[in-house]
Image (cartoon, rainbow, N blue to C red):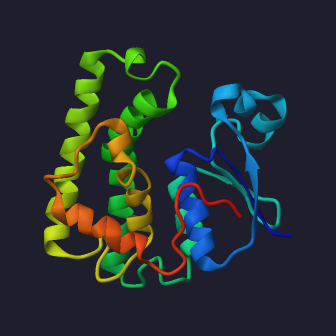
Amino acid sequence: MNHTLYAMQSSGNCYKPRLLMHQLGLDFRLVDTDTRDGSTRTIEFLALNPNGKVPLLVLPDGRRLAESNAMLLHLAEGTPYLPADRYERALCYQWLFFEQYSHEPYIAVARSWLSLQPGGRASVSAERLADLHAGGYRALRVMEARLEEAPWFAGSAYSIADIALFAYTHVAGEGDFDLAAYPRTRDWLQRVAGQPGHVGLDWRP
């Protein structure tokens, strides 16, 4: 039995485990589950994930795992995508937490309002959008500073920390973020896209 991923194709959080599973060469089944049409609020889906969100990963033995970065940690265990060095491993955790608390709530949300929600820009206030941009640019400055020190976020090699941050950074323009002032981040995006087995947001198994 293969892994099964309940996911929404346009979601960066859902993209993370899809990308990693492809890079690991894992076969998996994708079940399209759109949060916008009520699919995650059905009795059947809530029985799988009471939090009513995607992505949701069902392991080959039937156990379930929610939260995209938890999936990355589980899937990367014992592979080069999770550092073996104790400090670099802790750095990986650091950037996974940063992505969910200081990056995704701004960059992903701005993208959602402007590019995915019906109504686009008219559906979000100027004040709210300004707050999202302020938080997103703050996160981008932190990333740029890290990339002045090292080519990757969790040490000397590409890891799931890079996958997590790539997911929404590479589509930041859809949230009206301009990366012109972040040359190291732009170079890093190209390095990630050049990794073996890399696939884009539109890829499906």
Q: Quadrant of the C terminus?
A: bottom right
Residue 90 can be seen, yes or no: no
Identify the residue at horizontal 66%, vertical 79% (top origin): 25
Give the image location of residue 49, x and y in percent. Answer: 71, 41
**Along the viewing direction, whichever of 60 and 25 lies nearer the viewer:** 25
Identify the residue at horizontal 24%, vertical 76% (top origin): 151
Q: Quadrant of the N terminus?
A: bottom right
Identify the residue at horizontal 46%, vertical 76% (top origin): 82
Q: Quadrant of residue 90?
A: bottom left
Give the image location of residue 182, x and y in percent. Answer: 17, 56
Give the image location of residue 113, x and y in percent. Answer: 43, 27
Q: Quadrant of residue 143?
A: bottom left
**Along the viewing direction, whichever of 44 and 191 lies nearer the viewer:** 191
**Along the viewing direction, whichever of 134 and 176 lies nearer the viewer:** 176
Residue 147 can be seen, yes or no: yes
**Along the viewing direction, whichever of 104 and 46 lies nearer the viewer:** 104
In the visual, does 47 lie left or right of 35? right
Identify the residue at horizontal 41%, vertical 76% (top origin): 194
Give the image location of residue 104, x and y in percent. Answer: 38, 44
